[in-house]
Image: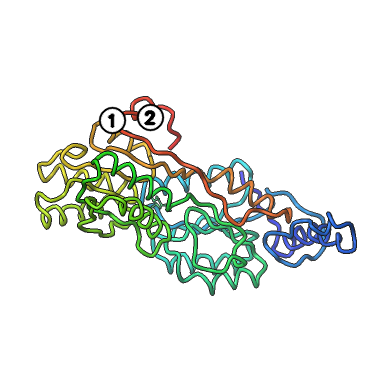
Amino acid sequence: MHRQNHVSRRALLAILGALSIGAGCSRGESEADSAAPKPASGTEPAGKKPKKLSEIVVGFSQTGAESSWRIAHSKSIQEEAEKRGVQLLFADGQNVHNNQVNAVNGFITKGVDVIVIAPQESVGWKPTLKEAKRAGIPVVLTSRGVDAEEDLYATVMVADFVWEGRQAGEWLAKQTNGKARIIELVGTPAADVAVMRKAGFAEAIAKHPDMKVIASQSGDFTRTKGKAVMETLLSAHKGEINAVYAHNDDMALGAIQAIQAAGLKPGQDIVVVSVDAVKPAFEAMMEGKLNATVECNPLHGPLLFDTIEKIARGEAVPKRTVVPGQVFEREQAATVIGSRAY
Ligand code: GYE
């Protein structure tokens, strides 16, 4: 049940003000006090009584619904908002950057209290983030980062995408004894997550002269495009390919369909490794078609709203929160799948 009335931006400034005045009044107080953390949003205060999280309106601009991971990410955030009685304005970007920019500009005009962005693309956000800052509206980034100065957002909540790519590369090196002719299915090229997963993988396989990426193409994190790209590359590189590295499970599952359609055995003739560790990936591992996946936990809801609560109180929050993961192999799938939360 969402509350109808909500605290206006001015009231949120009051919350921040009341607390940052509290923090700020350490001026002239003891050294320890003057070291009190500054409010994460950096907005100036007005000085009224702080209000509860449930009186705050959050504008959330989501990339779209491109993958199982994204659907789980949206569900986690929407369920947590419901649980905490927060009014969440959800804008589905349909995986188009400009849709997201328009939605966030709309949140600024509407005067929401906090803006959350899961950016389809990492570039092209500076003007909008500057507007949000001018309006005194804190911005929280989730699932991907943006190419902008750190003072333009309160915090970013991501995984270590370079580590994920490195884990995939190291696993593949071990699995193939350092001999692989690899197809790489890249995520959305303008997203930092794709750039970093590519970099981590390249770093890992660079140690093995007999591991080569023979083709690298974007499947945009979707199963449909992952399948289409793999079909094209299978016919362009007939008989050459013995491994696939996909930047997410959905593209890997599409590639597996293409490998089967070409009369080959995924997981055997062509080893497949990907990232996310969503439930369909565990099902594919149980069928022997996917060999390994690197976990990237999408359940950001609880941590996101804990963070928003702190920002609303004017408490300091870390500029970056890294959500941990681990590598799951085919052999573990049957024992692990029952406990997977997404
Ligand atoms: O790996 C993919 C989704 O930003 C970490 O985006 C997220 C990625 C995730 O489309 O499935």
Name the residue carrying label 1: 286
- The quarter of the picture where residue 213 lies is bottom left
Residue type at the position of mark 1:
Met
Mark 1 and 2 residues: CB-CB less than 8 Å, in contact? yes
Name the residue carrying label 2: 337
Judged left or right of residue 7, residue 280 is left
Residue 216: percent from left, percent from top: 25, 59
- The quarter of the picture where residue 284 lies is top left
Q: Which mark is residue 317?
A: none
Judged left or right of residue 251, residue 128 is right
Residue type at the position of mark 2:
Ile
Query: Could you say which is closer to the camera, residue 33 or residue 257?
Result: 33
Residue drawn at x 33%, y 34% as measured from the top left: 329
Residue 242: percent from left, percent from top: 18, 46
Query: Could you say which is closer to the camera, residue 134 or residue 337?
Result: 337
- Quadrant for the C terminus in the image: top left
Which structural element holds mark 2?
A: helix
Q: Is residue 262 above or below residue 190?
A: above
- Rate crowding at label 1 as few (under 14), some (14 to 19) or many (20 or more) other CA atoms within 10 Å: some
The tag earlier along the polypeptide, 1 or 2, is 1
Q: Residue furthest bottom?
A: 127
Q: Residue furthest top?
A: 335
Judged left or right of residue 34, residue 184 is left
